[in-house]
Image (cartoon, rainbow, N blue to C red):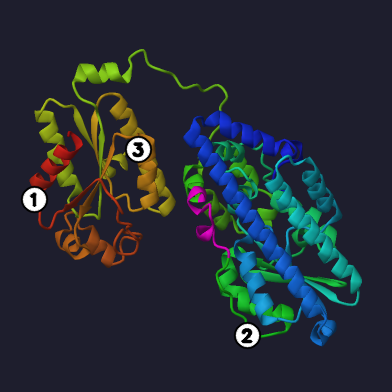
Amino acid sequence: MIINNATKSRRDDTLLTAGFNLRSGKIEKALIIRQRLKNIVFNFGRFVEERFRAIAYQVRHRSEAQQTADAIYLIYTMGKVASMSVLDAVTRRLPHAPVFAMHYLSDKNLKIQERQLYNSQHWDNRLYHKIHTKHAAKIRKCIDKYPQKKIKIVTIVREPLNQIISQIFQQLNFHNLETLKKMTADYGLINYDYPTEWCKDELHAFSGIDILQEQFNLEKGYEIYNSGRYSVLVMRFEDINRIFAEAISVFTGVNGWTLRAKNKAENKIYAQEYKNFKNELAIEASVLEKLYSSTFVKHFYTNNEIEAFKKQWKSFKKNDYVYKESSHVEKEERYSMLGYKPFTIWLTGLSGSGKSTIAKIIEKQLFDQKINAFVLDGDNLRHGLCSDLDFSPNDRSENIRRASEVAKQLNDAGVVVIAAFISPFRKDREEAAKIIGDRFYEVFVDAALETCKIRDPKGLYAKAIAGEIKGFTGIDAPYEKPKNPDIHINTENQTALEAAMKIINYARK
């Protein structure tokens, strides 16, 4: 339902072909086969889960309590992250009520799924569509069989791009990151209007309730709509932990609700792939603007929230007339002339740990050895190239991305770079390593927070503790220590010169 109709019937074959074209060799093919087997297991597990729920309902249906239940509960999902938590809560709290989870029930979408089932060439993808098509048909049959029962629908709206990307990744049965990145960045292949269309073509078509035409209380975080036999509870994903107990109590008339974590992405078989995918993803700027100006987004989120959502993503401006140029001088020729291969030493650690001091010593030592070295300092970059950035998490990430690109260019030009950045987030340092390549050495300049506070060479800790500086790393903003740095320096038991020489000897070995 997220992939555009024009590409649906070709999707499986395109992805499979792309995978083999992008990767070659026996090892790569083995990885592809392994991934497909994992997807088959995942889909089979989902099939068993859905059938178990259907059988359990049929058993409960024979009981007197089931016969007297006044409502059928539908957990209507656009994405499963929180919906499965809600499903778990409702089935535990209302054990005798018929409760179903599904993505679609409208005639239009049932026909689309049946067509995809018919067109699919791969049996694991056919299984996916068959599961949901049959499940939806059983729910429709149950609803028609008991016209006296009310239909109580629970659904969750979520920041759309996270929701769309999560579903694309879960739906596609061939997880090739490069192919997925190209698909996601291309507005022609991905239907970014899916949330708005789902509200109209699915929820409205099935229940008769158009939630986009009804008022939504942004401060409250949820709203209940009624139309004849149907009632719809809409909750915002971002508010779910705060509002769930109140919202579901008002909706069902039953108290005592708890929400447990279910179906988290980090528990999935593709958790690491998904994390890598999101970290590497870049979205065309015009796509972001179009998505976040949609009817759906403006209905459920404030302007400030929308701007914050946009800043989560790396964006680029598409220009069909910009081409990457190559040099007449090969890297190896340059390295041969210089007599050394340039690299980047990335110093990370708390403010006051000693990064800048060590960086300057490394620079001078290398320069004295006739090696062109240059210190790329975080403070210096913020006076020029990064002067437009603040210290929010997103701008910190952009600061490191820009620094990484500069370091890469300098390495290509034959310059050894000593980058001194707090770089508090592990994912940003991992991204820097990917940009710079195998010439990247991560050095953790370690010192206890209390030691850094005592040193406080720039007086920043004192100001942060006094509340004059907000978002200061180590005080009211986190620092994620490297797990496996190339070099670990402890400046409490090493001099700056000792640390610098240890780093130089490692990088030049």
Of badges 2 and 3, nearer the viewer stands 2
Q: Which residue is mark 3?
A: 404
Q: Which residues are magenta?
A: 263-274
Q: Is residue 66 visible?
A: yes
Taking depth in this image into account, of 491 and 68 the one nearest to the observer is: 68
Q: Which residue is mark 1?
A: 495
Q: Which residue is mark 2?
A: 256
**At label 1, which amino acid type do we have?**
Thr
Q: Residue at x 12, y 25 (%)?
A: 370
Q: Do labels 2 and 3 touch, CB within 8 Å?
A: no
Q: Residue at x 54, y 49 (%)?
A: 310
Local packing at callout 2 (Cα closer than 10 Å; few below 14, some 14-19, many 20+) is few
Q: Do labels 3 and 1 touch, CB within 8 Å?
A: no
Q: Is residue 387 visible?
A: no
Tell me, yes or no, whether the highlighted magenta stretch contains residue 395: no
Q: Quadrant of residue 225?
A: bottom right
Which label's residue is closer to the chain start, 3 or 1? 3
What secondary structure is marked by label 3? helix
Q: List x then y, in percent, for residue 4.
A: 72, 41
**At label 3, which amino acid type do we have?**
Ser
